[in-house]
Image (tube, rainbow, N blue to C red):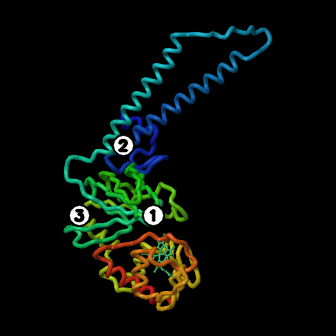
Amino acid sequence: MNSLLGHIALPLGRSGSFWFPPQSSTVAAGHDFVYNLILWLCIIFFVAICGATAYFMVVYRKRPGHKEEVTSTHNTKLEVTWSVVPLALLMVVFGVSTYWYMEMVTPPDEEVYELNVTAQKWRWTFKYSGEAVGGTYYCKYMHLIKDRPYQSIMTAPDNDVIHSMFIPAFRVKQDCVPGRYNRLWFRPTQTHIEAGMPDGFDLFCTEYCGDSHSNMITKVFVYETEAEWVAGIKKDGDLKGLNPEDRGAAIYAQFCSTCHSTKAGQDMIGPSWHGMWGKERDLADGTKVTYDENYVRESVLEPNAKIAAGFAKPSAMTPFNWGAENDLYFEGLIAYMKTLK
Ligand SMILES: [Cu+2]
């Protein structure tokens, strides 16, 4: 029944449909079943009601020799039918939806892997740490292993705005709220390669969050083996292997480029970084500060401590903090800023 209805509405079957990419998590089939059930109920009733209306308009139209009928005021059988049938159908929709909703919100009774997700104007950051990967990595892509259950612990920095993570191929979506932790579990059932999406599954922000909301997109990679997964994470988030300037450029591209330009005089949401290193910096409160290591570090960890002249307080910049990796990150960022002359 499930796949039968699925195939009527999804002519392309498992390889995706007009509405959705290929079903790639354990809840995807249920989601599509409910979606198609409601879609087809709407289509059938829409066509039947509009068809009947049009038919009666023609058959009972006013014309010479046709006597007007008296409007009937009551028909118990008809009224009971049009109340009971929709009620029964709604109960079916309610039952099926509730069943799949419970599947979506109840993690399985086995080891579930935690995945830290941070949404920030306008970036996604996935943190990987622990023995398996050997270190801490901040990745711009989501890396998963096929058939494993994941629980994402999702948040946004305190002075950011609400974002929402949507992975269409998994049919899952959850808000990332500043200062709160939301959870979302899912289990990928095929790799992005098997799904015919070699560039990875799409991940979107679906809560309008300002200027670059439409750029708040990234990719989800699902691997067969743990070795491939570790390699994917290291390729994405390993900054140790890079020299400081390249490391800084990579950090800039991942975290800062939506708001800071590296071209002369090109202010975006934040000031350009071009040619600033070592100069005196005018602040919004009329004082000055030297644009040096301390100023950069403070600006990133605590953007509101000093506001650059011409920019509003509270700062539009949300703080970044890479914890134990901070020195590695700042060494790279500062080396990179020094090159921007
Ligand atoms: Cu967003």
Q: Where is mark 1, residue-wise?
A: 160
Q: Amino acid at mark 3?
A: Glu
Q: Residue shown at 43%/51% (left/top)?
A: 21
Local SS, label 1? loop
Which x, y percent locates residue 243? 34, 86
Q: Residue shown at 49%/16% (left/top)?
A: 81
Q: Where is mark 3, residue-wise?
A: 226
| Comes first in the chain, label 2 or label 1 | 2
> Which marked residue is nearer to the observer: mark 3 or mark 1?
1
Q: How packed is label 2: few (under 14 Cα within 10 Å), some, or many (20 or more)?
A: many
Q: Is residue 252 above or below residue 201?
A: below
- CA gap between label 2 and label 1 equals 34 Å
Q: Residue shown at 41%/42% (left/top)?
A: 32
Q: Amino acid at mark 2?
A: Ala
Q: Left or right of 78: which side holds 178? A: left
| Comes first in the chain, label 3 or label 2 | 2
Disc sitting over residue 91 in the figure: none
Q: Amino acid at mark 1?
A: Asp
Local SS, label 3? helix
